[in-house]
Image (cartoon, helix red, strand yellow):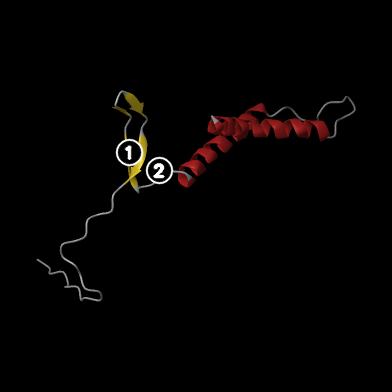
């Protein structure tokens, strides 16, 4: 719910700023603004802000690659929602490598 509210506020931000601008802008002798209302540009600016926030939130709060998705399932008659779980650490290698051991060069066929 809060993310939807956040996105709505970002979309409405250009309109709110324009409203404030119309209140403080100088008007001509007839009491009108000297230019037409830029509704299309305000709409595009709102969409750009929302898309930029989608990208930012996807980067900043993404699931990452540290876990795997467990889909929603039924456990003991109750529905458990889908979620991400951390992957267990990989098992230790059966062939330990000594530190600073030389690595054999690749042989060309």
The image position of residue 5, as x and y in percent, is 58, 30
> For mark 2, what is the residue?
63
How crowded pointer 2 is (Cα within 10 Å; few <14, some 14-19, many 20+) is rated as few
Exactly how many numbered labels are in the figure? 2
- The reply to whether discs 1 and 2 touch (Cβ–Cβ < 8 Å) is yes
SS of the residue at dot 1? strand
* Quarter holding residue 17: top right
35 to 58, vertically: above or below: above
Front residue (pair 68, 29): 68
Q: Is residue 9 left or right of residue 104?
A: right
In 3D space, how far apart are the residues under numbered discs 1 and 2 (Cα atoms)?
9 Å
Which quadrant, please, contains the C terminus?
bottom left
Q: Is residue 91 left or right of residue 69?
A: left
Q: Residue furthest right?
A: 29
Q: Residue furthest front?
A: 76
Q: Residue at x 21, y 60 (%)?
A: 92
> For mark 1, what is the residue?
69
Q: Residue at x 34, y 42 (%)?
A: 85
The image position of residue 38, as x and y in percent, is 68, 29
């Amino acid at each position: 719910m809060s993310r939807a509210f956040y996105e709505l506020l970002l979309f409405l931000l250009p309109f709110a700023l324009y409203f404030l601008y119309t209140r403080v802008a100088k008007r001509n002798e007839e009491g009108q603004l000297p230019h037409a209302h830029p509704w299309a540009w305000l709409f595009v600016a709102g969409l750009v802000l929302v898309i930029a926030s989608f990208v930012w939130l996807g980067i900043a709060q993404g699931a990452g690659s540290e876990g795997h998705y467990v889909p929603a399932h039924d456990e003991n008659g109750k529905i458990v929602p889908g979620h991400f779980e951390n992957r267990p650490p990989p098992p230790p290698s059966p062939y330990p490598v000594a530190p600073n051991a030389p690595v054999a060069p690749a042989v060309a066929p």
